[in-house]
Image (cartoon, rainbow, N blue to C red):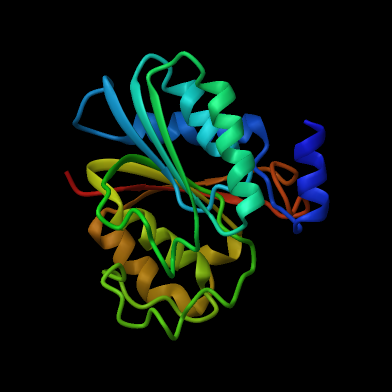
């Protein structure tokens, strides 16, 4: 705990996912997926921070043979996530692989299809790689505008889901209404990829003054 607090204070300002919210996100993703079995599951968090969502997935999918994959740009945070998961999964049939990288720009799991994906992406980040990724094949619903990094993460998650797999992503409420993202949101709805939007009460996670949303996504079966 003390190591985590030091990291969160000194490495960079973090927007961690509180444990109750992380557990809720994992349960929703597990319930939303269709097809497949619960015997063996692959879990992905492409912006794992200190590992709260990955840990919640391990707890909620207890009894399954798990592969937990994560990405984190900061090597210290990636190491903390690896240590957290190693402690949590000791004696369990769980394989973990936490990479130090920027998942949008340099995806180490580009060929992986996950059963569930969870993400609390960096908040209000504009330098997400708009120019470098303009022709990326993940943008099946349209190139995310420079000012809409959350829609890049949404499509990144969808690109990694196996047929029938589900993802839950935490986003600011403005993502659902900003004019710049209207075309992509429309495509997500028409295709059935966006299954639900859950409004959370203020204080559920940082920034605490904002009523954040959970977007529930599912890949076509």
Residue at far bottom of view:
131
Q: Quadrant of the C terminus?
A: top left
Q: Quadrant of the N terminus?
A: top right
Residue 164 placement, left or right of 126: left
Q: Give how far across and how far down residue 88 sits, in percent.
A: 56, 22
For the point 19% across and 31% down, the residue is: 35
Residue 1 placement, left or right of 144: right
Q: Give how far across and how far down residue 176 sits, in percent.
A: 51, 63
Image height of 168 relative to 27, above or below: below
Q: Give how far across and how far down residue 216 sits, in percent.
A: 41, 46
Considering depth in this image, is 70 or 215 the residue closer to the camera?
70
Considering depth in this image, is 187 or 20 the residue closer to the camera?
20
For the point 56% across and 50% down, the residue is: 120
Image height of 127 relative to 37, above or below: below
For the point 29% across and 70% down, the residue is: 141
Image height of 194 relative to 30, above or below: below
- Rendered image quadrant of residue 153: bottom left
Residue 102 placement, left or right of 184: right
For the point 54% across and 27% down, the residue is: 86
């Amino acid at each position: 705990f003390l190591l985590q607090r030091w990291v969160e204070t000194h490495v960079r300002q973090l927007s961690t996912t509180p444990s109750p919210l992380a557990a809720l996100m994992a349960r929703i993703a597990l319930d939303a997926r269709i097809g497949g079995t619960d015997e063996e599951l692959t879990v992905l968090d492409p912006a794992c921070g200190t590992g709260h969502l990955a840990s919640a997935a391990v707890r909620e999918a207890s009894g399954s043979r798990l592969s937990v994959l994560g990405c984190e740009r900061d090597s210290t945070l990636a190491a903390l996530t690896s240590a957290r998961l190693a402690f949590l999964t000791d004696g369990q049939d769980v394989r973990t692989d936490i990479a130090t990288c920027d998942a949008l720009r340099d995806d180490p799991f580009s060929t992986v299809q996950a059963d569930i994906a969870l993400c609390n992406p960096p908040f209000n980040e504009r330098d997400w790689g708009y120019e470098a990724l303009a022709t990326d094949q993940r943008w099946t619903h349209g190139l995310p505008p420079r000012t809409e990094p959350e829609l890049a993460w949404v499509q990144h998650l969808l690109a990694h889901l196996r047929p029938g797999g589900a993802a839950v992503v935490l986003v600011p409420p403005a993502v659902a209404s900003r004019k710049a993202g209207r075309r992509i949101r429309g495509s997500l709805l028409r295709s059935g990829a966006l299954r639900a939007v859950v409004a959370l009460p203020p204080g559920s996670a940082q920034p605490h003054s904002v009523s954040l949303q959970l977007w529930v996504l599912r890949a076509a079966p």
